[in-house]
Image (cartoon, grey):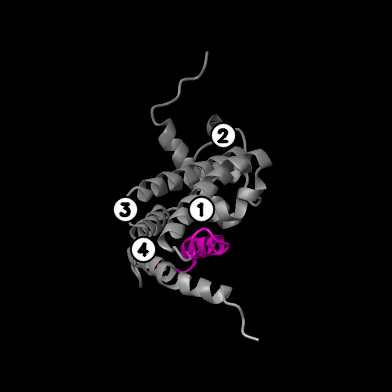
Amino acid sequence: MARTRARDYDTKRLAILHKSAELFARHGYTGSSINMIAEACGVSKALLYHYYPDKEAVLFDILSQHLGMLVAEIEKAAQSHKNPKKRLHALAAALLEAYRDADAEHQVQIANLKLLPKESQEILLVMERRLVTIFADTIAEALPDVGRGPLLKPITMSMFGMLNWHYLWFREGKGLSRAEYARLVTRMITAGAGPAAAAVTETPKP
């Protein structure tokens, strides 16, 4: 007879994922063991195996849960404004807010996705590409001079760079707030990317 799941199964599973993400971010995926995960989560190894068969499954679920949440928040934000510049700000603000209390998961995504088997990577990369597509579509609409030309990808990935790496220097309650930084990044892209793109594509004078 199959074992019945406890009512708090999902709550405990999410707690295991968050504690595991913190462990992987601190010690690295390869430097962490199932024993260390169980100890960090305050559970027995036998109970941990009730949730996950191995460390790889834990890593995949951390990333799947995290990216799934990001996609849901960004898709919601993408419906918020018809004006593409306002929509781009909404996307930036939503992404930064989604990163709140998720620094560990974010670090694990950046550093460890490539350690999973190819078939697992591809599932997660589909979600990453969805995020990039939503931002790129909005930037192309907000910057007609850039449109879908060859500089759309560099500009899109530059915006992600400003948003994705903010956790390295950002400190809650000090300096810019998340909302203020979202406005700053959006303004840098909408006001600066067009002229910068024009400068890049100018034909140098002999």
Q: Is residue 179 among the parts visible in the rendering? A: yes
Callout count: 4
Dot placed on the residue nearer the N-terminal end, 4 or 3: 3
Mark pair 1, 4: CA separation: 20 Å
Q: Nearer the viewer, residue 60 or 1?
A: 60
Residue 60 lies, in percent from the top left, at 57, 41
For marks 1 and 2, the one nearer the N-term is 2
What residue sits right under mark 3 in the picture? 81
Q: Mark 4 points at which residue?
A: 178
Q: Quadrant of residue 101?
A: bottom left
Callout 2 amino acid: Tyr
The answer to the question of whether label 4 and label 3 lie on touching residues, with beta carbons closer than 8 A, is no
| Circle nearer the N terminus (2, 4) | 2
Nearer to us of marks 2 and 4 is 4
Q: Distance between the residues labelled 3 and 1?
A: 18 Å
Residue labelled with disc 2: 52
